[in-house]
Image (cartoon, rainbow, N blue to C red):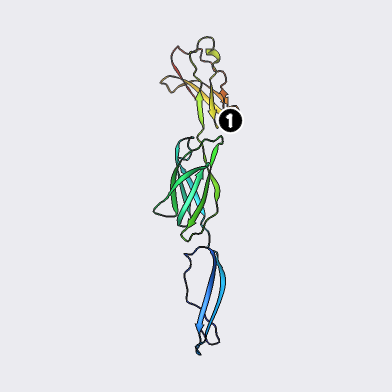
Amino acid sequence: VQSGGAWTSNAMDISGEANGTYTVVVTGTNASNVEATESTNFTLAQALPTLTNATFNPTHQAEGQNVTVRLEFDKALQAASAELGGSAVTLTKTVDAKVWTGDVVVPVSSELTVGLVVKDYQDLSGNTGAEDRSHSMPITPTLAITPVGNVDSSNAAALQITGTSSRFDGQTVSVEIKAQGSDTVIASGSATVQSGGAWTSNAMDISGEANGTYTVVV
């Protein structure tokens, strides 16, 4: 205590404590051996941890297949959890506790992407960051070709290829026909995918080609 009564404590480190309300208690005894005590409250409000990046390996994946999620935070964490489309990601912290990784099976979804929810992540002081829904992973689209079967003079001049797909509605897909084992395209066309995924190419003329086996590439 200085002349006049002012005093300042030594520096104390409470950076490792959770945010909240704390009480300061000061006790002293003066030269007359009389004790006095005073207390006051204050609020500790350190910055909460935040998610800085989320990546997927592979960058897109098919339904029912495994994907690895990598989460990066601005602080070391003691706990974290995440869900991909409602499926829990099994997270493990790396040597750098700012980085957590985990695997999950891509759930079935009718959407183009599946959302990632990162939540319940706590820094080493027990402070919990805000739930993050800003990241999503594209689901791998699919294409299927209806078996063409034998082509003869009745349809070789106006051959149409049909098939189904997922996550291509409204998009245009290209269709090529090649002799089996050859890279040379002998006919090409396109198809607009209908709602629900079905598609039918425009008519392609292969009536001038020799009999044999051909490959369709979509």
Name the residue beneath numbered marker 1.
169
Q: Nearer the viewer, residue 137 or 20?
A: 20
Residue displayed at 45% across by 40% down: 67
Percent x, y of residue 107: 50, 37
Look at label 1 and name its amino acid: Asp
**Looking at the image, how many numbered discs can be counted on the residues?**
1
Outermost residue toward the bottom? 32
Residue displayed at 54% across by 71% down: 23
Secondary structure at numbered mark 1: loop
Percent x, y of residue 111: 56, 36
Query: In this rendering, is residue 25 above or below 125?
Result: below
Residue displayed at 55% across by 51% down: 131
Percent x, y of residue 122: 49, 56
Query: In this rendering, is residue 62 above or below 8?
Result: above
Residue displayed at 50% across by 13% down: 151
The residue carrying pointer 1 sits among few (fewer than 14), some (14 to 19) or many (20 or more) residues within 10 Å by Cα, namely some
Percent x, y of residue 124: 46, 59
Outermost residue toward the front? 34
Q: Nearer the viewer, residue 36 or 167?
A: 36
Is any part of residue 107 visible from this angle? yes
